[in-house]
Image (cartoon, rainbow, N blue to C red):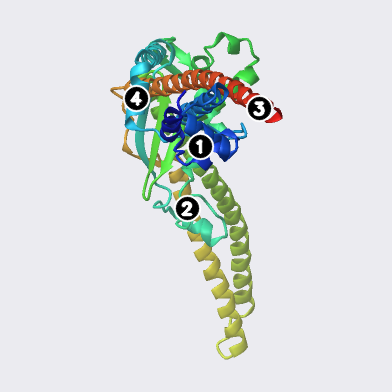
């Protein structure tokens, strides 16, 4: 090769122009380079060395596109990944278009089959109720409060905590004994049999079935307390069954509160009856004492002490007569209240059968499955590209190392000579 061609090649590829730089690059003396310039000839082994050097730099530029660099000592340096450009994203979509279309389609079809044939629909019936105990005030409650008896119907009594009572095991066990009509399981079936329709659960003992049924029923009930009322919601797999369950639950709540208030009223009646017996005895004794005092002291107009004693005995009789009369009146009121029918639960909005299912939302679940399929397909495509790129990079690195060590070996042999 001519020296002028070598100089042009070094300037174009390595940006080397001066003779001293050429000598340093080829590891020769400046005098040798001057001789090549004078003869316009370059020995073959130095031309080969230049070509190998240029090949190494070409491989460096190739790997730099993948953010992998190699220095003059042969050490590989992998930099951070380059940022994703819109063109790269478009190329990714074009290269994996089939995968990005088939994967969401398969996921959506599977979800459609799932919500159509596997997942059972859920219907929710709602109602608005309110407690009437806070506004109720009965004469029995008033007189019981006067004697230190606390009843559930007193004015100071707070509203029932429906959130805990409705979702209590006591109410749930009562609900499990009730019978309902269903389309799937037939008519006049107990709620326990409806909830325990699974063959695996039928073989359990009655106590275990009842515990499982209680937990299932409590999970179907939702109660939310508002400022002035409660919002009750109960779910089932049939719309009419959801409505019937809500009605039955309100009835059970009414019955439980009526039973509670009746128990409190009975305790008040028993207390008043006992007090009547005691007051009647005290009243009889006071009247007998007043009669005996008058019999012994027929002329007491001129005795202030006797007049004062008579007044005291008369006052005692009057007080006992008032208490006895009041107790008698309250006893009659209690008896009336025991047989009186009243609504303890005020239903603002009665339960109704829902017109459409509440869960699952088919459209939302299918769209969500499609998006999940798209994400899964994208991740799988990125993994394929990463594996393919790593294979090409490894091949390039191996070729670069071979060329580097070959060049290193040639340089070492030349320097030894």
Q: What residue would you read off at disc 3?
A: 414
405 in relation to 303, above or below: above
- Residue name at image x 39 percent, y 52 percent: 135
Q: Nearer the viewer, residue 152 or 204?
A: 204
* Residue 331 visible to the viewer: yes
Q: Is 141 situated above or below 231?
A: below
Label 4 to label 1: alpha-carbon separation: 39 Å
Residue at numbered disc 2: 158
Above/below status of 399 relative to 263:
above
Helix, strand or loop under label 3: helix
Q: Which residue is mark 1?
A: 80
Does the CB distance between marks 1 and 2 fall below 8 Å? Answer: no
For the residues bearing labels 2 and 4, Cβ distance under 8 angstroms: no
Dot 3 or dot 2: first in sequence order is 2
- From the viewer's perspective, is the residue at label 1 or at label 2 nearer? 1
Instruction: Kindly identify which residue carries mark 4.
Output: 364
Which x, y percent locates residue 73? 62, 34
């Amino acid at each position: 090769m001519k020296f002028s061609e070598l100089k042009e090649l070094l300037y174009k590829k390595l940006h080397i122009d001066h003779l001293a730089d050429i000598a340093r690059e080829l590891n020769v003396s400046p005098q040798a380079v001057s001789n090549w310039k004078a003869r316009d000839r370059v020995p073959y082994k130095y031309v080969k060395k230049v070509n190998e050097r240029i090949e190494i730099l070409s491989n460096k530029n190739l790997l730099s596109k993948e953010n992998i660099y190699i220095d003059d000592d042969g050490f590989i340096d992998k930099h951070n990944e380059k940022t994703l450009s819109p063109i790269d994203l478009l190329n990714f979509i074009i290269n994996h278009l089939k995968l990005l279309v088939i994967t969401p389609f398969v996921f959506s079809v599977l979800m459609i089959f799932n919500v159509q044939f596997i997942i059972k629909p859920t219907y929710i019936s709602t109602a608005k109720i309110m407690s009437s105990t806070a506004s109720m005030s009965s004469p029995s409650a008033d007189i019981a409060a006067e004697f230190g008896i606390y009843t559930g119907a007193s004015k100071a009594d707070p509203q029932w905590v429906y959130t805990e009572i409705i979702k209590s095991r006591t109410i749930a066990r009562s609900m499990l004994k009730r019978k309902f009509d269903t389309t799937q399981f037939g008519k006049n079936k107990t709620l326990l049999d409806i909830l325990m329709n699974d063959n695996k659960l039928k073989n359990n003992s009655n106590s275990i079935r009842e515990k499982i049924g209680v937990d299932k029923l409590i999970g179907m009930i939702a109660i939310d307390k508002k400022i002035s009322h409660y919002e009750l919601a109960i779910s089932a797999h049939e719309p009419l069954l959801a409505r019937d369950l809500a009605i039955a639950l309100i009835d059970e709540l009414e019955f439980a509160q009526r039973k509670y208030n009746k128990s409190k009223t009975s305790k008040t009646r028993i207390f008043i009856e006992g007090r009547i017996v005691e007051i009647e005895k005290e009243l009889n004794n006071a009247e007998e004492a007043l009669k005996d005092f008058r019999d012994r002291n027929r002329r007491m107009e001129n005795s202030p002490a006797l007049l004062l004693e008579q007044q005291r005995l008369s006052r005692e009789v009057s007080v006992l007569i008032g208490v006895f009369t009041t107790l008698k009146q309250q006893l009659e009121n209690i008896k009336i209240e025991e047989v009186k029918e009243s609504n303890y639960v005020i239903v603002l909005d009665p339960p109704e059968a829902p017109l459409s299912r509440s869960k699952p939302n088919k459209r939302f679940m299918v769209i969500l499955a499609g998006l999940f399929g798209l994400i899964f397909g994208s991740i799988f495509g990125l993994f394929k590209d990463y594996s393919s790129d790593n294979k090409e990079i490894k091949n390039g690195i191996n070729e670069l190392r071979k060329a580097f060590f070959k060049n290193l070996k040639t340089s070492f042999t030349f320097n030894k000579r």
